Amino acid sequence: MSASDRPFGKTHEVTNQAPPLVGYDSFAFDAALSAALAREGAQWHADTLSRDGIALTQPEAVALADLANRHEPVLATHSPRGERIDALEFHPAWHELLRRLRHEGLHAMPFEPQARAGSMAARCAGYYLHAQLESGSLCPVTMTFASIPVLRQEPDLFARIAHPLLSREHDARDIPLEAGKHSMLIGMGMTEKQGGSDVRSNRTRAHALGAPGRGGAYRLVGHKWFFSAPQCDAHLVLARTAEEGGLSCFYVPRFTSDGRKNAVQVQRLKDKLGNRSNASSEVEFLDAYGVMIGDEGRGVPTIIEMANFTRLDCVIGSAALMRAALVQAIHHARHRSVFGARLVDQPLMRNVLADLALESEAAALLFMRLAGAFEESAAPGGSPQARAWRRIVTPAAKFWVCKRALEFTGEAMEVWGGNGYVETGPMARFYREAPVNSIWEGSGNVMCLDVLRAFEREQDAAHALLDDWKTTGGAHPALAGALSALIGMLTGDPAAREASARRIAQQLVLCAQGVLMARHAPREVADAFIDTRLGEARGDTGRIYGTLPARFDHAAIVTRAFAA
């Protein structure tokens, strides 16, 4: 062939590259999720999830996630005429992601007037599917969702905002609710520069404009170091009503009743490692208008009710990152050949993928059981076991699953090799997203200390939960031994317990996952998880994925994880 016959710039044909993973049903191909949905009483939502599972993997949906993260939000503090406006501009992809999330009711489904039994599990399963696509858009949805139980305790306020709060329409306009806005988002402002997780060191002050106390109007003066997300229509914030008094919780709208922007000035947007599609900010309150919700001085307990829900979403979000990274890794390994064989057929790579699959399934079973327990514990006559899952296991799960996501996404990225390390694929974004859930809503140490407090305050519920787990441990010696070790940690020297809080939380979560795997996963899968996380093989496997004993059927575990 002469040079003139050769296509311009063509030196080779592209072969041995995995095609994009698009156009599959991310719900139907997740055996663990679909079984858990039925088990938690939400089978009625399966068809909707399947429809959504297909829509979320279409090429145009995948493109939305990339666009929203490449074109980050931009803050304009002033208009061309010099007026203070604090306007945020988002790429249209961001608003389309919010529209989809809102349309599926993921901001409010369990709290809607027509909510059915199993709505919490249905909502969490849908959130899990969306979280596999894009993480930043979940932040305002989670905060809105978590705010509803708190706001419902304020009848007068809730009556005014219930319709836009529960609406399944996304209204991107930056206008007052009174001007006809169809829906609203709620954000949070808790931390200050000097405190971080130690919100009791907050110094922002609230001064009564009239009668003080619950439902009263106040002006707020101070700052927030992390204020997410500043474009929301209202925020829940903490402030002091006296120099040395307790913190109270306030509802701070974006616009005041006269239609003007509230005096909450956005100083700058945070330049974050990940979660880049979402806007997080620093703000100052310059006599900002707010309404006290909850009792005066009881702001922290009020917010803890909200934090219980946001922590659940942190678990789901991290589990979703793991799932998304896993299916990408399996898909790549099925299409890539190295040294004369497909990666998925090579024993060591199969070991890695199978180990990742065990971790992912255990995380999914855990958050779905927590979802069911949240609903059960809120119902009249809720069982003590459900209360223990919600109050004791949730912070432990938030600690453990969010931590595991960091290593997990890194390992999955390595399966892709150099292709995983570049920004043209999804793996780099998954990896950058992974740390945020460990940090947001309480770092690992905060979660583990909360586990200890919960055990102390909920002893009856804790005993009921452990007794229930023992019924499963009897058929699995490794699990029974792990439960005995956990009880020993909890009943040991109180002085040493705090220093061992991470070990206790880890053991608690692994026991919880072991019980769930034993009850609901195929025997081979359950045995592989329990033996390598709690049993005799635990010392051999360590923290590195891909160290499963050869006696387990690695190929079958991988096939179960993603049969597409």
Image (cartoon, rainbow, N blue to C red):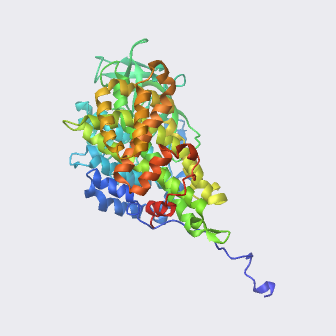
Where's residue 189, x and y in %?
44, 31
In the image, residue 243 above or below residue 375: above
Q: Quadrant of residue 165?
A: top left
* Along the viewing direction, whichever of 409 and 155 lies nearer the viewer: 409
Q: How many numbered discs?
A: 0
Residue most extreme to the right? 2
Q: Residue at x 43, y 62 (%)?
A: 560
Residue most extreme to the top? 244
Residue most extreme to the left? 380
Where's residue 507, x and y in %?
45, 36
Residue 73 seen in the current view: no
Where's residue 361, x and y in %?
43, 52
18 relative position to 214: left or right: right
Residue 129 seen in the current view: yes
454 relative position to 60: left or right: left
Residue most extreme to the bottom? 1
* Along the viewing direction, whichever of 117 and 238 lies nearer the viewer: 117
Q: Quadrant of residue 336?
A: bottom right
Q: Quadrant of residue 130?
A: bottom left
Q: Residue at x 57, y 52 (%)?
A: 547
* Quarter occupied by the C terminus: bottom left
Where's residue 74, x and y in %?
55, 44
* Quarter occupied by the N terminus: bottom right
